[in-house]
Amino acid sequence: MLTAVNDTMPDAAPALDADADQALVAQAAAGGVAAFEALYRRHASRVHGVIARLVGYHGARAEDLTQEAFVRAWQALPNFRFESAFGTWLHRLAVNTALMELRGRRSRPFEDSDEETFDTLGSADSAGHVTALSMDLERAVASLPPRARAVLVLYDVEGWKHEEIAAELGMAVGSSKAQLHRARSLLRARLGEQA
């Protein structure tokens, strides 16, 4: 029997019970669509959160990548070996989905240049207010160049080690450290302007 999902509070993260996940994963791996829907409801907000942070809070992009991560999870479930918790496995799959998209964007021209967005922060808007004054931390992180943002999110938010980040992003460990320093410096400068 499937665990009931509390639909009255969609933003509240449900208690992620590993035993319930294990039963749902087994059912979903055998083709149980209802079980996979329950897994989706249990984990969607966390998956969307990490993807949104990695892609700079671009709403539609984060939504698309969240859906892509769950499609990949559905396809890979028959090979899930229960060596880690489903939530851990899914979270890593989501991060990898976002990072693959970021790597792909590096190889083609920018459609919405993050570098240009960063350069315009702090300029006066039509009302004469400085945009940086109303900027919050999320927007500041979103304004970072993509690689610096990815390193900052993976290191400071997700708790990855520089060696893991370097391997995942295809850079040297020293480059990961340099990108983190760059991201923190840019954040300090932008957030310091608000004070």
Image: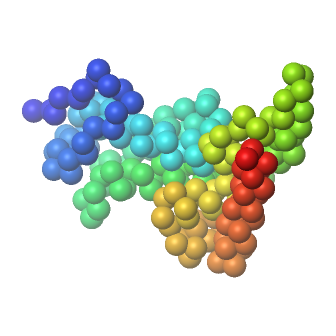
Residue drawn at the location 58% of the way across and 56% of the way down: 153
Q: Is residue 147 visible?
A: no
Left or right: residue 124 versus residue 18 is right
Q: Is residue 65 visible?
A: yes
Q: In the depicted view, which residue is nearer to us: 194 or 179?
A: 194
How far across and down, in percent of the image, does residue 148 sit? 70, 59
Residue drawn at the location 87% of the way across and 22% of the way down: 127
Q: In the depicted view, which residue is nearer to us: 4 or 36?
A: 4
Q: In the depicted view, which residue is nearer to us: 101 or 190?
A: 190
Q: Is residue 4 above or below residue 160?
A: above
The furthest residue to the front: 195
How far across and down, in percent of the image, does residue 156 sit? 55, 62
- Tally of numbered tags: 0
Residue drawn at the location 52% of the way across and 57% of the way down: 157
Residue drawn at the location 58% of the way across and 68% of the way down: 165
How far across and down, in percent of the image, does residue 47 sit? 44, 43
The furthest residue to the left: 1
Quadrant housing residue 7: top left
Quadrant housing residue 176: bottom right
